[in-house]
Image: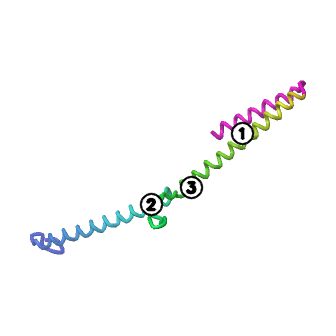
Amino acid sequence: VVEGGDPRDTTWGLNIRAAHQEILIKLCNVARKQVRDDLERESLRLGRFVTERRGADFQDVWKDGTAIADIIDQQRELQDKKAEVEYSKKVFVKNKTARVRGNTDMTEEEERGFALQEEIFRMRAAHIR
């Protein structure tokens, strides 16, 4: 005889089955709540559709999350750096050509300086890509 009832008693088995069902339902509800919370966190991070009122109508509008906003900011910074490198290179080439046209006798040191500067611009451009 098992403590809590006689296994041959049919009501005892029904009580155990009901207890198991109740426990499984509670576990399922906890798992659903956890999945719902995880999805909410991810939607805040990645983005989601938000219903907004536009005049007399309602429209679903996509709002970027924090991760997407961070990526957009990084892209903007890279574009700014790339534009800065291109502008610096353009100014350098302009100054170099003006220097070469004005004085055909460049010292070896000046030539090395120009070559080094060109290499630096190439490396910066390659790093940004």
Question: Residue visible at 89% across and 27% down?
Answer: 107
The location of residue 89, given as percent across then percent down, is: 75, 37
State yes or no: residue 121 in magenta.
Answer: yes
Q: Check disc 1: other Cα within 10 Å, few if <14, some if 14-19, many if 20+.
A: some
Q: Looking at the rendered structure, which numbered label has been put on residue 36?
A: none
The location of residue 93, given as percent across then percent down, is: 78, 33
Q: Would residue 59 appear left or right of 24 to someone viewing this image?
A: right
Q: Of residues 100 and 126, which is closer to you in this image?
A: 100
Q: Quadrant of residue 33?
A: bottom left
Residue under label 2, please give it: 60
In the displayed structure, 9 sits above or below 105; it is: below
Question: Residue visible at 76% across and 32% down?
Answer: 118
Residue under label 3, please give it: 69
The CA distance from mark 2 to mark 1 is 41 Å
Residue under label 1, please give it: 86
Tell me the magenta residue range. 103-129
Question: Residue visible at 27% across and 67% down?
Answer: 25
Q: Would residue 73 appear left or right of 89 to someone viewing this image?
A: left
| Majority secondary structure in the magenta region | helix
Which label lies toward us, 3 or 2?
Answer: 2
The amino acid type found where label 2 is placed reads Asp
The amino acid type found where label 1 is placed reads Glu
Which label lies toward us, 2 or 1?
Answer: 2
State yes or no: residue 128 in magenta.
Answer: yes
The amino acid type found where label 3 is placed reads Ala
Question: Residue visible at 12% across and 69% down?
Answer: 7
Q: Reading the chain from its start, which is encountered first: label 3 or label 2?
A: 2
Q: Quadrant of residue 116?
A: top right
The location of residue 29, given as percent across then percent down, is: 32, 66
Q: Quadrant of the N terminus?
A: bottom left
Q: Of residues 97 and 5, which is closer to you in this image?
A: 97
